[in-house]
């Protein structure tokens, strides 16, 4: 659970628990991604599985050793939603 304003700067945060401002920024990126997808639905084919297997194969990989910027992850996911 994220609690606004309850931690002092000297307290350590867990890496998967971003500060409130960072969390809001990350969530905004996800909302923008979803809204763009929904906005463009009328322009997208209703059924297109051509290349789906190849696209899915690009996501089969070992767990990363370090994090990646959310923008890069969403960019990579984009073709899977189109």
Image (tube, grey):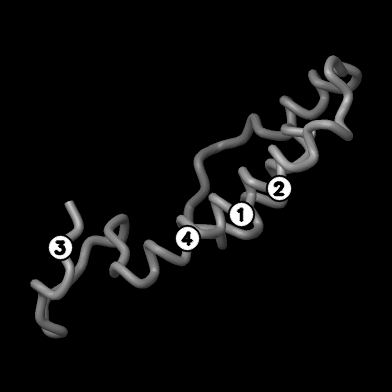
Q: Is residue 9 above or below residue 71?
A: below
Q: Is residue 28 left or right of residue 34?
A: left
- At 90% from the left and 18% from the top, the residue drawn is 50
What's the distance in space between the residues labelled 3 and 2, CA to CA? 30 Å
Q: Which residue is mark 3?
A: 3
Q: Tell whether 67 sits left or right of 42.
A: left
For marks 3 and 2, the one nearer the N-term is 3
Packing grade of label 1 (10 A; few <14, some 14-19, many >=20) is few
Dot in front, 2 or 4? 2
Quarter occupied by residue 48: top right
Distance from Cα at disc 1 to Cα at disc 4: 10 Å
Label 4 sits on residue: 26
Task: Name the residue nearer the viewer: 69 or 1.
Answer: 1
Badge 3 vs badge 1, beta-carbon distance below 8 Å: no
Distance between the Cα atoms at labels 2 and 1?
6 Å
The Cα atoms of the two marked residues, 3 and 1, are separated by 24 Å
The residue labelled by disc 2 is 36
When asked about the image quadrant of residue 21, the answer is bottom left
């Amino acid at each position: 659970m994220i609690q606004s304003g309850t931690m002092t700067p000297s307290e350590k945060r867990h890496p998967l628990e971003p500060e409130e401002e960072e969390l809001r920024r990350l969530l905004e990126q996800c909302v923008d991604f979803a809204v763009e997808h929904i906005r463009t639905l009328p322009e997208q084919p209703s059924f297109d599985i051509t290349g789906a297997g190849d696209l899915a194969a690009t996501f089969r990989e070992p767990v990363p050793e370090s994090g990646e910027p959310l923008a890069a992850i969403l960019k990579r996911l984009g073709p899977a939603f189109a």
